[in-house]
Image (spheres, rainbow, N blue to C red):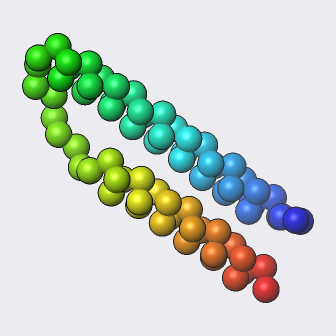
Amino acid sequence: MNLSDPVMAAVIGAAATFVTAVIQLTANARRQAAERAAGKPASRKSGSWLAIFALALAALVGGYALFRVSEL
């Protein structure tokens, strides 16, 4: 796969953003679980985890499809 420099930079940036978002979601979920286990209410309720991961997956699939179409 021969990618131009701007495309490679965009791919690296998108991957870094995605990994950072997953790390932050995991840390937030652990913190909320610890608060609930201690009997405290969670500081705030966030959206459904399934919805968040579905959106991330849809963005990944859409980006890959756009990449494949642009290769043609």
**7 horizontally vs 25: left or right:** right
The number of callouts visible is: 0
Q: Residue at x 25, y 27 (%)?
A: 32
Q: Quadrant of residue 11?
A: bottom right
Q: Residue furthest bottom?
A: 72
Q: Check the picture and name the quadrant holding the C terminus.
A: bottom right
Foreground pick, 20 / 35: 35
Relative image position of residue 25 (x, y in whole percent): 39, 37
Q: How far across and down, in percent of the image, does residue 61 sit?
A: 57, 68
Image check: 27 left or right of 15? left
> Which quarter shows the N terminus?
bottom right
- Rendered location of residue 16, percent (x, y): 60, 43
Residues 33 and 52: in front is 33
Q: Nearer the viewer, residue 62 or 35?
A: 35
Name which quarter of the figure residue 38 lies in.
top left
Q: Does residue 28 lie above or below 35 as drawn? A: below
Q: Residue at x 26, y 19 (%)?
A: 34
Tell me: 20 left or right of 31: right
